[in-house]
Amino acid sequence: MEKVIVYDVSRYSGAIRNWWASLTLGIIFLAFGILVFTRTGDTWLGLTLGFACMVIISGVLELITGGATPVQAGRGRLIATGVIEILLGAIIIMIPEVLFVYLPLVLGFWLMFRGYSMVSNSSDMVGYGIKGAGLTLAFGILTILTSFLMLAVPFIGFGSYALWLGLALLFAAIGTVFYAVQLAKLRKYLA
């Protein structure tokens, strides 16, 4: 006799309905990570403006997901994250020259925050017994570790920094895509 598993996914209903937002964000992280590896010689200005656009898109997607999430499931955190990311992106676009000095720190902290978010989301899903969330957890931890390396040695040279930035973005991309796939699989459990 086959065991039937039924998950209570009401807490994740907003994220599940908008699973495509996580997938889109993962694809953007992947594209930017590949860009960092392939265009290492490009200027800080290009990297700064690309990062600003990525953060704004991330913020908009967080707002979409937050707006569809129940209050008890972290709606405020998602909306606050979206607003902060949009403001951060707007500030970067308005005064990119100031960020030339601070870009390594801003990127490091932002990626660390994204890693903690992946760990938090996947830990909740593991706690609820949802299978397959371990990969998201693993890549969230890898994102945090590489962001620590970015923060530990932010000014040692653009080539070394680009390596850690590219790795952190690729880890964030893979973890976010795994999270989106898990959310898409959970759609059948929504009431």
Image: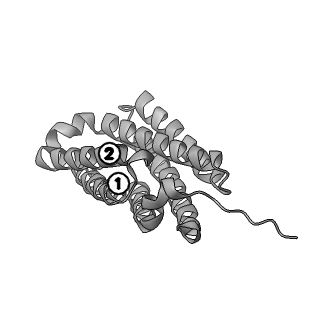
Q: Name the spot of residue 88 as percent of width and height, x first.
A: 22, 44
Number of labelled discs? 2
**Rendered view: 155 above or below 139:** above
Report, in whole angstroms, how far the alpha carbon at label 2 lies from the one at label 1. Answer: 9 Å
- For disc 2, the marked residue is 81
What is the number of the mark on residue 58?
none
Residue 155 location in percent, x, y? 35, 31
Q: Quadrant of residue 62?
A: bottom left
Q: Residue placed at 17% from the left, 49% from the top? A: 90
Residue farthest to the left, as pictured: 94
Q: Which residue is tagged 1?
A: 66
Contact between marks 2 and 1 (CB within 8 A): the answer is yes
Q: Is residue 142 visible?
A: no
| Mark 1 neighbour density, 10 Å: few (under 14) some (14–19) many (20 or more) | many
Q: The residue under label 1 is which amino acid type?
A: Gly
Q: For the residues carrying marks 2 and 1, which lies nearer the camera in this image?
A: 1
Q: Residues within 10 Å of mark 2 (few under 14, many from 20)?
A: some
Q: Amino acid at mark 2?
A: Thr
Nearest to the observer: residue 144 or residue 33: 144
Q: Is residue 76 left or right of residue 149?
A: left
- Given residues 182 and 101, the one toward you in this image is 182
Q: Residue furthest right?
A: 1
Q: Is residue 148 above or below residue 136?
A: above
Secondary-structure class at tag 2: helix
* Location of residue 54 in the rendering, given as x and y in whole percent from the top left corner: 31, 56
Residue at position x 58%, y 52% in the image = 136
Question: Looking at the rendering, in which quadrant would you find the N terminus?
Answer: bottom right
Q: Earlier in the sequence, mark 2 or mark 1?
A: 1
At horizontal 33% and vertical 52% (from top left) the residue drawn is 41
Q: Quadrant of residue 159?
A: top left
Extreme-front residue of the structure: 191
User: Under tag 1, what secondary structure?
Assistant: helix
